[in-house]
Image: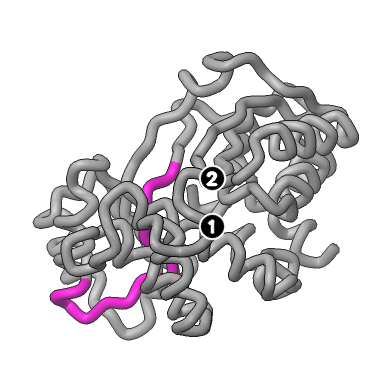
Amino acid sequence: MSGHSKWSTIKRKKGAADAKRGQLFTRLAREISIAARQGGGDPDVNFRLRLAIDRARTNNMPKDNIGRAIQKGTGEGKDGAAQIEEVIYEGYAPHGVAMLIECVTDNRNRAVAEIRHTLTRFGGSMGETGSVGWQFNRLAYFSFPLADHDQDQIFELAVEGGADDVTFDDGVVEIIGAVDNFKAINDELEAANIETDEAGLRMFPTNEIELNPSDTAQVLRVVEALEELEDVQNVYSNLHISDEALTELEVA
């Protein structure tokens, strides 16, 4: 996954990811609302909600916005909770790259229409339910800068929390583990006062496709276009982003 992590860093530098602040706040608010609907509005007992709130605060989302999102999720807000739902769509980018597109939406018809239009515009297509999902596994994922942390300490605490894999690449630490071990790993990191850039559940492909740099860039343009849609929270693919492709993308 290091290629995807580096690509995310490149996007942030270029201002390509969540370029519109209002769009970012909308996504964060929906994430909070869904978490509150599923586990209640108390972050002390709702771990998913606590993570969503932490992410919102990291991105400087106003306290009032966070509060309204929680109320909407619990049904206390005027909009109610039932209007928002999570849904995953499956499809293909050009060159047969498999894609999973996670949405949080109050209008399924709008979401699927916009995703289908985007995929078609870039030479991809929607897939039937189950056509792509079997190629991915949901896993716990953590990422943060190595900075002044000790590699051996990080490795030990990650293993103590039940991690399956720990990598150190280009100053970035990535920890991967089973979903059931997410909280244990997170607790170990918090106890060591390590702040993560990303902590959550992600979909990982069981096998990846590697394309030439030009075709890789074409697929990533599809990913970016999908990420700009209002209802899309996350886009996953089985594309392997090579170092050669990253070099070309960074200078593009």
Please, is residue 107 above or below residue 135 in the view?
Answer: below
Helix, strand or loop at label 1? It is loop
Identify the residue under disc 1: 79
Quarter of the image holding residue 66? bottom left
Residue drawn at (58%, 60%) of the image: 27
Contact (Cβ within 8 Å) of mark 1 with mark 2: yes
Q: Position of residue 126 (x, y in %)?
A: 72, 23
Residue extending farthest left: 160
Where does the C terminus fall, quadrant-wise? bottom right
In the rendered structure, the answer to whether residue 239 lies left or right of residue 29 reads right
Please, is residue 46 above or below residue 117 in the view?
Answer: below
Question: In the image, which disc is placed on residue 83?
Answer: 2
Question: In the image, which disc is placed on residue 104?
Answer: none
Task: State how many labels appear.
Answer: 2
Q: Position of residue 107 (x, y in %)?
A: 65, 40
Q: Position of residue 246 (x, y in %)?
A: 69, 56
Q: CA distance from mark 1 to mark 2?
A: 8 Å
- Span shown in magenta: 190-202
In the rendered structure, the answer to whether residue 158 lies left or right of residue 252 reads left
Q: Amino acid at mark 1?
A: Asp
